[in-house]
Image (cartoon, helix red, strand yellow):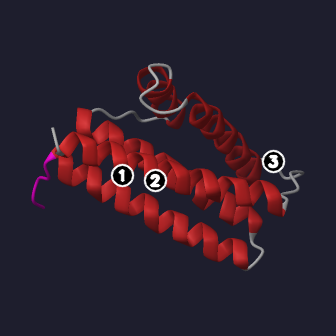
Amino acid sequence: MEKKTSKEFALYRLDRAKEECETAELLYRESKLLASNNRAYYSIFYAIRAILAMEKIDFKRHKDVLAYFNKNYVKTEIFPRQMGRKIIMASKVREDSDYDEKYEPNSEATYLQIETAKELIELVEKYLGNLQSK
């Protein structure tokens, strides 16, 4: 397999984020809220990892990816602080959806997951575009 540049790898991960977001929307329309929450979270996760690809950095654990992003991109206000809070909530909803058998998903929370994914994808596209123009 051909080795990708940081930019190519970042764009690959961003495409993956978009695919996961589309899947989350399809599942949402079919009222499969638990699965939709999962896919929306993974859309967010891949979008964040697209940013990390530009630094050639990655982590094995999700919590480390999220912590690094929050420390280096949210707290420094490269990305809005509100987005950091939304990502933390998305992570919690995904964990509840995947692991808490008593968790009752609701349409509104799932819709917000998808909207967070879309918003982050847009911000990441803009960020990567700004990096390319420098």
Q: Extreme left residue here? A: 2
Q: Earlier in the sequence, mark 3 or mark 1?
A: 3
Residue 43 vs residue 86, the one in the foreground:
86
Give SS at disc 2: helix
Picture quarter containing residue 82? Answer: top right
**Residue found at x 49% / y 46%:** 45
Residue range (magenta): 1-5
* Residue that badge 1 annotates: 125
Tell me the amino acid under the disc marked 1: Glu
CA separation in Å, label 3 and label 2:
27 Å
The CA distance from mark 3 to mark 1 is 33 Å
**Label 2 amino acid?**
Ile
- Find disc 2 in the rendering and name its residue: 121
Crowdedness of circle 2 by 10 Å Cα count: few (<14), some, many (20+)?
many
Tag in front: 3 or 1: 1
* Callout 1: SS: helix
Instruction: Determine if residue 42 is in view.
Output: no
Q: Nearer the viewer, residue 85 or 27?
A: 85
Work out which residue is located at the far bottom of the displayed protein and give it: 30
Q: Position of residue 97 (x, y in %)?
A: 75, 53
Q: Are marks 2 and 1 in contact (CB under 8 Å)?
A: yes
- 46 vs 125, nearest the viewer: 125
Q: In the drawing, does residue 40 fall left or right of residue 3?
A: right
Mark 3 is surrounded, within 10 Å at the Cα level, by few (under 14), some (14 to 19) or many (20 or more) other residues, namely: few
Q: Which disc number belongs to residue 71? A: none
Of badges 3 and 2, nearer the viewer stands 2
| Residue type, mark 3 in image | Asp
Relative vertical location of residue 41 with respect to residue 52 in this rendering, above or below: below
Identify the residue at horizontal 44%, vertical 19% (top origin). Answer: 76
| Circle 3 residue | 100
Whether pointer 3 and pointer 1 mark residues with C-beta atoms closer than 8 Å, the reply is no
